[in-house]
């Protein structure tokens, strides 16, 4: 059995959209996160659009560039989409200090579109 190509396409479109906003205008993520969204960022639990966006905007760096290594998508029960992203971050142009990361998004179906319900972010440290 294969993953539905439409699920993969939607997942990839979401990832491109999310990182495009994250990398250019983090406060703009308020259009993606919802009141019911939860985020676990490096073990810190946050809930609701205001708390999540405040945390992300206040991260101690200005610029991010990323290389996506993989995007895996699966349809969930709701039906929704679970997305796992792995990649490498370059923070504030520090090419010598690239950081590996994994991020997981859980999107729930809502009237023909999708809402971000859960988000997990972790650096992968050796």
Image (cartoon, helix red, strand yellow):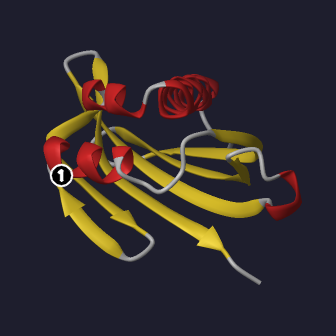
Q: State left or right for residue 93 relative to residue 52.
A: right
Closer to us: 78 or 120: 120
**Splitting the image into 4 quarters, where does residue 3 fall?**
top right
Q: Position of residue 22 (x, y in %)?
A: 49, 34
Secondary structure category for the residue under label 1: helix
Q: Residues within 10 Å of mark 1 (few under 14, many from 20)?
A: some
Q: Residue at x 33, y 31 (%)?
A: 27
Q: Which residue is mark 1?
A: 51
Q: Position of residue 64 (x, y in %)?
A: 63, 41
Q: Position of residue 25 (x, y in %)?
A: 44, 26
Q: Which image quarter holds the C terminus? A: bottom right
Q: State left or right for residue 5 relative to residue 77.
A: right
Q: Position of residue 101 (x, y in %)?
A: 65, 61
Residue 104 sits above or below residue 112 on the image: below
Q: Residue at x 70, y 79 (%)?
A: 125
Q: State left or right for residue 104 relative to residue 79.
A: right
């Amino acid at each position: 059995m294969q993953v539905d190509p439409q699920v993969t396409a939607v997942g990839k479109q979401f990832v491109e959209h999310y990182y495009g906003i994250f990398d250019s205008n983090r406060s703009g993520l308020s259009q993606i996160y919802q009141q019911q969204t939860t985020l676990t960022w490096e073990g810190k639990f946050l809930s609701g659009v205001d708390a999540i966006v405040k945390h992300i905007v206040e991260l101690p760096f200005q610029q991010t560039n990323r290389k996506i290594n993989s995007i895996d998508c699966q349809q969930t029960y709701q039906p929704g989409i679970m997305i796992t992203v792995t990649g490498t971050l370059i923070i504030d142009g520090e090419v010598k200090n690239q950081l590996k990361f994994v991020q997981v998004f859980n999107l729930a179906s809502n009237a023909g579109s999708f809402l971000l319900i859960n988000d997990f972010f972790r650096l992968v440290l050796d």
